[in-house]
Image (tube, rainbow, N blue to C red):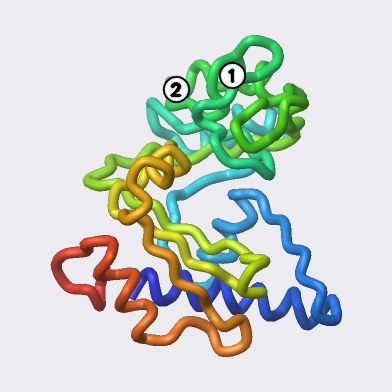
Amino acid sequence: MLISTFARAATRQARVAASAMGGVRNLNLHEYQSAQIMKESGVNVPFGIAAHTVEDAVKAAAEIGDEQVVIKSQILAGGRGLGKFTNGLQGGVHIIDTKDVKEYAEKMLGGTLVTKQSGAAGKPVNTVLLAKKMDLAKEFYFAIFMDRASGGPLIIACSEGGTSIEDLAESSPEKIIKVPVNITTGPTDEQIETVVNGLGVSGDKESA
């Protein structure tokens, strides 16, 4: 099951980090780094290439080879899609024509992106992720946080996913699934079943 694989891979990485640092858990990963960990653990992720320069971004888009690509700012803060750069560019995530990658990369790389979670000063964008554009049938929200209250991972999931999960949590908190996970043993089958059922996944759960 995809969610099972992802959840266990994430908690396994958290355990490794905790062990390596003597029980102090400080783990900050950008999206492209997390995607690589999930890919190595057998989770399907959209094809993407991280770029640190404008030239690398153009090459990455060419390697993807489609007419359109997704270009995504890599910062350690949520709300990127609805954020704004201090140079005036609206949004830290864009679906664009491949021919426009150079223009967008020049505006994004080296810029400062301000989001709901970044603080007023914003965060510098030193990396962008060029990703293959996907045709979405349905969008879910799924994340694993390190929760201070429980001292371990906390699965957050919602069947109505999207970029405004914080707003949904305020207006309809009952739609948000929260499952604390033991950092040593990982998620149980019962916990994974709770998440799957809460997301409203239909069809064959084993191949979801």
Residue bearing the label numbered 2: 96
User: Which residue in the structure is indicated by mark 1?
Assistant: 104
Q: Is residue 159 something one can see in this rendering?
A: yes
Placement of 179 over or under 35, stated as above or below: below
Asked if one can make out residue 42 in the rendered structure from this viewpoint, the answer is no
Real-space CA distance between mark 2 and mark 1, rounded to the nearest whole angstrom? 9 Å
Q: Is residue 152 above or below residue 118?
A: below
Residue occupying the point 60% across, 58% down: 34
Q: Nearer the viewer, residue 125 or 97?
A: 125
Asked whether the residues under the numbered discs 2 and 1 touch, taking CB atoms below 8 Å apart as contact, a structural biologist would say: yes
Quarter containing the C terminus: bottom left
Residue farthest along the left direction in this orientation: 203
Circle 1 SS class:
helix
Place residue 156 in its image quadrant: bottom left
Left or right position of 193 against 60:
left
Determine which quarter of the picture holds residue 151. bottom right
Query: Which of the 4 image quarters holds residue 104?
Result: top right
In this rendering, the count of numbered labels is 2
Three-letter amino acid code of the residue under disc 2: Ile
Residue lying at 71% horizontally and 79% vertically, measured from the top left: 16
Give, as a three-letter code, the residue at label 1.
Tyr
Q: Earlier in the sequence, mark 2 or mark 1?
A: 2
